[in-house]
């Protein structure tokens, strides 16, 4: 792709309009968790208006009726083969988890599977897009058109050359085999792209990233420049999100909304990793909340992500199949007290400054375009 064409694509992103990002949290249900009523009271007191449920069960979904908390449901990977080949299997899942509760429970999104590529299972890979299509078709047949249906992909498993973000692309062969057909389907069905942004893993993989940059710390010289576009980045989260947005634009779908299904920072790691500390988790989460609530979006997309889900409410103890280091990402104890102070309602930040920077960047880009 010629340089000038990617610049035009990126320029068109800058001209998009802004809307507020919804901030939510991920809650993985376990048998030792408090009753749903207590959870919901805590969400409401923390001003959390969106919840992502990776393993929803009907009773849990029922508890959210009349709360006006929006729900992001997930269909387990194990059900994908059945749903892919058979609309009745999709109907069956929807009749248990959606139809009895909707719209009194504000279900807004359904992810058909999570991070299926991490398991390298080619059979599921082939079945993924047909499964997403079947769930959307079943919902439409029932007359429910407002729920966005997609699958959750993981940044580290689908994006390549994310530094600088303007060079980011989807990895082959999943790009051709799955992501392009998925993006076409999402555009056709007015649905969003779901992606997990694991800043912690990317930080760990790239020793040149300063910790303050990963943790949203604001210092005058704490920035990285995209060497191709000259766009300035002040945190790792924006670099990752813009990498996704560029990869989508190169695939011809820059207008599909992006939902960040997971992002967080672990508190304690049994492998004794020094950065997996409470003080850093607090900095990451508060920095994320402030950044999302500020409504600044990313340097390339004014509206940024439409939704961002913090990973996660409680530490996991269903660690059987998980690798070590994935069980201590919770920001809350099971007794519902916070591990550290975090203000989810926080907003503010100066929008004017960033807008100015954006205008200057845009003018520079137009100049660059004219010199080609
Ligand atoms: C979590 O751990 C507690 C004990 O610490 C146990 O009783 C409970 O069953 C566990 N939950 C799951 C889902 O493994
Ligand atoms: C429900 O939540 C949505 C989005 O958060 C908001 O726009 C709407 O006003 C809320 N409705 C009620 C009845 O609180
Ligand atoms: C389709 O799925 C339904 C529900 O899971 C099942 O009863 C039926 O046997 C399936 N049909 C085929 C052809 O697999
Ligand atoms: C697409 O979805 C948005 C929000 O989910 C909605 O406002 C809009 O009307 C939808 N457009 C179509 C063509 O369905
Ligand atoms: C909640 O649990 C944590 C960890 O077990 C404990 O440190 C804290 O004191 C408890 N808080 C309350 C209010 O019981």
Image: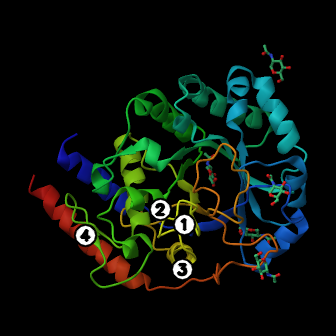
Asked whether the residues under the numbered discs 3 and 4 touch, taking CB atoms below 8 Å apart as contact, a structural biologist would say no
Which mark is on residue 279? 3
Residue 66 seen in the figure: no
| Real-space Cα separation, disc 3 to disc 2, in angstroms | 14 Å
- Rounded to the nearest whole Å, what is the CA distance between mark 2 and mark 1? 6 Å
On screen, 23 above or below 80? Answer: below
- Give x and y (percent) for residue 255: 46, 50
Residue 112 placement, left or right of 223: right
Ligand 1 in which quarter: bottom right
Mark 3 or mark 4, which has the lower sequence index?
3
Name the one closer to the observer, 25 or 212.
212
Residue toward you, 218 or 341: 341
Q: CA distance from mark 4 to mark 1?
A: 31 Å
- Taking the image as shown, residue 47 lies to the left or right of residue 276, namely right
Classify the position of the N terminus by image quarter: top left
Judging from the image, what secondary structure is the residue with disc 3 in?
Answer: helix
The Cα–Cα distance between marks 3 and 4, rounded to whole angstroms, is 34 Å
Quarter-of-image position of residue 334: bottom right
Disc 3 or disc 4, which is closer to the eye? 3
Residue for badge 2: 200
Residue receiving disc 4: 361
The label number, if any, that marks residue 311 in the structure image: none
Mark 2 surroundings within 10 Å by alpha-carbon count, few (fewer than 14), some (14 through 19), many (20 or more):
many
Locate residue 30, reporting x and y percent.
81, 55
Q: How is the image coloured?
A: rainbow
């Amino acid at each position: 792709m010629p340089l000038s064409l990617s610049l035009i694509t990126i320029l068109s992103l800058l001209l998009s309009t802004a809307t507020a990002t919804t901030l939510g949290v991920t809650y993985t249900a376990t048998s030792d968790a408090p009753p749903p009523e207590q959870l919901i009271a805590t969400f409401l007191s923390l001003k959390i208006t969106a919840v992502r449920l990776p393993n929803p069960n009907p009773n849990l979904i029922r508890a959210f009726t009349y709360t006006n908390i929006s729900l992001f449901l997930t269909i387990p990977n194990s059900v994908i083969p059945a749903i892919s080949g058979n609309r009745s299997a999709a109907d069956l899942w929807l009749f248990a988890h959606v139809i009895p509760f909707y719209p009194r429970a504000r279900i807004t999104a359904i992810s058909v599977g999570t991070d299926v590529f991490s398991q390298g299972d080619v059979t599921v890979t082939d079945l993924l897009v047909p499964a997403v299509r079947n769930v959307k078709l079943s919902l439409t047949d029932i007359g429910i058109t407002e729920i966005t249906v997609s699958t959750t992909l993981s940044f580290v498993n689908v994006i390549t050359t994310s530094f600088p973000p303007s060079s980011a692309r989807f990895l082959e062969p999943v790009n051709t085999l799955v992501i392009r057909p998925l993006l076409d389907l999402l555009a056709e069905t007015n649905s969003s792209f779901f992606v997990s942004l694991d800043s912690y893993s990317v930080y760990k993989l790239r020793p040149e990233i300063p910790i303050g940059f990963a943790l949203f710390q604001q210092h005058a010289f704490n920035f990285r420049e995209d060497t191709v576009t000259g766009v300035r980045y002040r945190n790792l989260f924006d670099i990752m999100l813009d990498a996704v947005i560029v990869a989508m634009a190169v695939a011809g779908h820059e207008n599909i909304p992006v939902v960040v299904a997971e992002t967080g920072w672990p508190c304690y790691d049994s492998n004794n990793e020094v950065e997996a500390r409470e003080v850093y988790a607090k900095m990451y989460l508060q920095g994320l909340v402030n950044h999302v609530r500020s409504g600044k979006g990313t340097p390339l997309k004014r509206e940024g992500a439409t939704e961002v889900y913090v990973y996660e409410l409680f530490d996991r103890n269903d660690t059987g199949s998980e690798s070590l280091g994935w069980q201590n990402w919770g920001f809350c104890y099971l007794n519902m007290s916070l591990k550290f102070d975090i203000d989810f309602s926080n907003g503010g930040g100066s929008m004017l400054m960033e807008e100015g920077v954006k205008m200057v960047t845009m003018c520079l880009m137009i100049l660059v375009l004219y010199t080609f």
